[in-house]
Image (tube, rainbow, N blue to C red):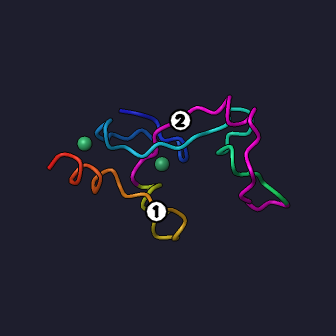
Amino acid sequence: MFTCAACGRRATACPDCVNMMAVDPETGLPPDVAIVDGTATTIEPTPEARERSKTHPLCDACVTAAIVAGKTDMMTAEQRHRLRHL
Ligand SMILES: [Zn+2]
Ligand SMILES: [Zn+2]
């Protein structure tokens, strides 16, 4: 069991296969994302943000939503699991 970094829901996934996202604890966002005028914008992460960021697991619901929105080339943990453990 883990807590999803994006939605905070408890989820389960194979630890080898779960998608991870870097989160800057100061902003609660990935180090390369900033909110500019209310919109999430991709920025060049500062070395400090990179340094203090920790990777957190993402649940498949969030990954699937990102895939559907065309925001990521990640695979769902289910797909990764099938590829990795053949
Ligand atoms: Zn989630
Ligand atoms: Zn697996």
For mark 2, give the secondary structure. Answer: strand
- Spatial distance from mark 1 to mark 2, Cα to Cα? 17 Å
Q: Position of residue 82 (x, y in %)?
A: 21, 53
For mark 1, give the secondary structure. Answer: loop
Label 2: which residue? 55
Q: Is residue 65 left or right of residue 51?
A: left
**Residue at 68% of width from left, 36% of height from top?**
50
Task: Specify the amino acid type for callout 2.
Answer: Thr
Q: Residues within 10 Å of mark 2 (few under 14, many from 20)?
A: few
Q: Position of residue 24 (x, y in %)?
A: 67, 36
Q: Position of residue 52 (x, y in %)?
A: 68, 29
Q: Residues within 10 Å of mark 1 (few under 14, many from 20)?
A: few
Task: Specify the amino acid type for callout 1.
Answer: Asp
Which stretch is magenta? 37-60
The answer to whether residue 17 is above or below residue 67 is above
**Residue at 42% of width from left, 61% of height from top?**
64
Label 1: which residue? 73
Residue 20, magenta (yes or no): no
Query: In which quadrant of the rendered view does residue 18 lie?
Result: top left
Q: Is residue 49 left or right of residue 6?
A: right
The answer to whether residue 41 is above or below residue 20 is below
The answer to whether residue 2 is above or below residue 34 is above
Considering every residue shown, the one lying at the far right of the view is 37
